[in-house]
Image: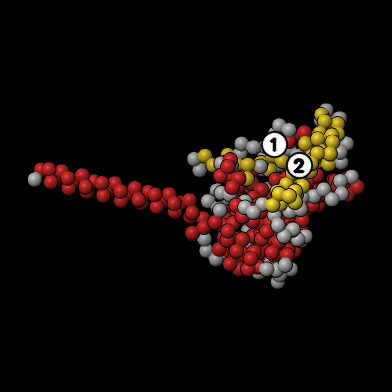
Amino acid sequence: MRRNRTVLVIAAMLVFVIFFMSIGISATRTSKQKLVRSSKNNLTDINYNVLNKSLLIKFYESQFIKEAGLLRAAVTAPSENISIYISNDNFLAVRALEVLDLYNLSLIINKTLKEVYPGYINCRLGVLFGKPMPSKVYGTDIITFGQVYSKEFRSCFIIKTDMCNHSKIMNDWYNYSDLIVYRALNYTISCNLRKTMDLFVKLISMWDGYGFEDQVYKNTSLYQVYKCALFIYLYRTLRAAGVKSVGKYNNIAEECLFVIKEAQDNVTGGIHTDYKVVNGKIIFPSDVNVETTSFVVLALYSNYPISLGKRCR
C-alpha cells in the first residue's frame, strides 16, 4: 500500500509540474506574440513625430564632405566612417533633406549625383518613389569609384555605390523583410492591392514583438532599425490606399515607432542601424548612419507613402 501511495503521489506531482510547465510555455508564447494577437481594428491617427528634428538636421550637416559634394556614410564604424555611398545613402538623403527643409544641402548633393554619378542607383530604391522594380529581385555589389581628401576631417574618403547585379537572382527574397516591403510597394504602383496585402501579411508573420525575425536576424541575432521604418512606410501607403484591415496592426506601427525613437542618438542626432533586446530592454550596439536615418525620415515625415497609396483610391 505504501508503495502504491508513493507511486500515486509521484504521479500526481508529475502531472502538477507538467501542467504548470505547459502554462509557462503558453504564457511565453502568448507574451512574444501578444502584440499581434491582441490587436484590434483601429484606424485612429498615429503620431509619427517622435524624433528630435533639430538633432536630425545637425546630423546631416555634420556628415557633409565639401570636397565630394556628398555625405559620408557613418560616424564611428570602421571603414564606414571613411566611406561615401552614392546609393543608398546619398540617393535617399537628397529627398530626406528636402523633408527636413535642408534645401540647399539637398540641391548640392543632387547636383553631384546627376553630374558626376548619373545612373548609379540601386534598382530597388526607386519603388519608394513610384518607379517600378525589375520583375526579378537581384543581389547587389559594391562598386568603388575612387577617393577624395577632406581638409575638415583630415582624412581620405572612399566613394562607392551599391548596385544591382543582374547575374545574381535572389529566389529567396521572401526571407528578407526589406525585400518583402519593396515587392509589396511594387504591387501598389500597379494598384494590385491583393498581392500587396499578401506580402504585408507575410511581413507581419516575421514580427516577434521586438523586430522582424527575417534571414538577417537569424544569421546575426540583430534586428535592423530601417526595417521598422520600411514597415511604417508600407503601413502608411496601405492606409492611404484605403485598406482598412491594416488598422488592426496599429500596435506594430507603434512598437516600430518606439524602436525608432529609442534609436536616435542623443549626441550625433543620427539613427542607430542595429539593435538587440536584452532582458526586455532595447540595446543599440551599432553606429548611426545616413542610410538608416534617411529611411526613417522618409517613412515618418515624407508624403511619398501617401502619394503611392492615393494612386489606388
**Residue visible at 70% across and 45% down?**
292
**Secondary structure under the numbered disc 1 in the rendered image:** loop
Q: Whole-percent x and y of residue 269? A: 71, 41
Mark 1 neighbour class, 10 Å CA radius: few under 14, some 14 to 19, many 20 or more: few
Q: Whole-percent x and y of residue 238? A: 66, 64
Label number found at residue 8? none
Label number found at residue 142? 2
| Residue type, numbered disc 2 | Ile
Point out the frontmost of discs 1 and 2.
2
Can residue 172 be seen by looking at this rendering?
A: yes
Reply above or below: 109 against 45.
Answer: above
Horizontal placement of 162 versus 203: left or right? right
Q: Whole-percent x and y of residue 187? A: 69, 64
Quadrant of the rendering where the N terminus is positioned: top left
Can residue 64 be seen by looking at this rendering?
A: no
Name the residue furthest front: 167
| Residue type, numbered disc 1 | Val
Q: Which comes sooner in the sequence, label 1 or label 2?
A: 2
Name the residue furthest bottom: 313
Task: Tell me the CA gap for discs 1 and 2.
Answer: 30 Å
Q: Nearer the viewer, residue 75 or 98?
A: 75
Quadrant of the rendering where the C terminus is positioned: bottom right
**Residue visible at 86% across and 31% down?**
149
Label number found at residue 267? 1
Mark 2 neighbour class, 10 Å CA radius: few under 14, some 14 to 19, many 20 or more: few
Horizontal placement of 283 versus 142: left or right? left
Q: Whole-percent x and y of residue 45? A: 63, 62
**Secondary structure under the numbered disc 2 in the rendered image:** strand
Specify the quadrant of the image occupied by residue 136: bottom right
